[in-house]
Image: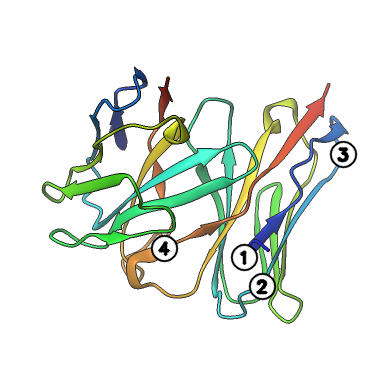
Amino acid sequence: NAGVTQTPKFQVLKTGQSMTLQCAQDMNHNSMYWYRQDPGMGLRLIYYSASEGTTDKGEVPNGYNVSRLNKREFSLRLESAAPSQTSVYFCASSLLVGQGDYGYTFGSGTRLTVV
Amino acid sequence: QKEVEQDPGPLSVPEGAIVSLNCTYSNSAFQYFMWYRQYSRKGPELLMYTYSSGNKEDGRFTAQVDKSSKYISLFIRDSQPSDSATYLCAMSVTAAGNKLTFGGGTRVLVKP
């Protein structure tokens, strides 16, 4: 099993450009998440989708949009990139509690630089 | 003040020593507690999961939760150079949406 796959792995954007980060999981998980990780700030939740067809804002949603395309795929879009969005982005997925393993499975990350 | 506090380290120990990591938190409603390990340039991976208070042991790893003190710990016995990584604690209130709040992570270096 591939687990959680993120594309691309690296990206450099100019200020004002847009892009979509892709995430797909093959574990039949219900919930999916997007986090950003910055030095000294830890992992901060951007958006999450508790189940197919639903999305909700996390701690730092400004400047981002998401789409839960189907049960497998959850994309993150930057409409107009800003230098403050330079970060490492992680997608994760999980089962709902009560269905077994509670933990998240993370992808390997997308390293984004906005210049 | 952050909801979950974790010393960033680095914590440097000789091979074979016990590594002791901890997190403090402010939200008394947290019920689910986890520890993740993150190698450089990789995503975090789940090490330990505990519900409510108590201890849990898995091989060389022991997780402890003290809800009365709002304090959780992870102990790594007989540490190996391969344990060198950043360790993140994480916790959540309920199952709904499974939203986790993470600590900032502690970097651990195990020297041969």
- Residue type at tag 3: Ala
Q: Earlier in the sequence, mark 1 or mark 2?
A: 1
Q: Dot 1: what SS?
A: loop
**If the image is split into quadrants, where does the N terminus of chain A sit?**
top left
Question: Which residue is at a point 41% across and 36% down the rendered structure image?
Answer: A89
Q: Give the CA separation, mark 1 to mark 3.
A: 30 Å
Q: Position of residue A13 (x, y in %)?
A: 34, 20
Q: Which residue is mark 4?
A: B99
Compare marks 1 and 3 and give the one earlier in the sequence: 1
Q: Earlier in the sequence, mark 4 or mark 1?
A: 1
Q: Which mark is residue B26?
A: 2
Look at label 4 and name its amino acid: Lys
Mark in the foreground, 4 or 1: 1
Q: Which chain is disc 2 placed on? A: B
Which of the two labelled residues, at mark 2 and mark 4, occupies the earlier sequence position? 2
Q: Do labels 3 and 4 touch, CB within 8 Å?
A: no
Q: Nearer the viewer, mark 3 or mark 2?
A: 2
Q: Can you give x and y, in whole percent of width and height, for residue A110 in the image?
A: 38, 28
Find residue A101 and report its horizontal and vertical position in percent: 40, 59
* Residues at discs 1 and 2 in contact (Cβ within 8 Å): yes
Q: Is residue A24 above or below residue B65?
A: above
Image position, residue A61 (x, y; %) = 36, 52
Q: Earlier in the sequence, mark 3 or mark 2?
A: 3
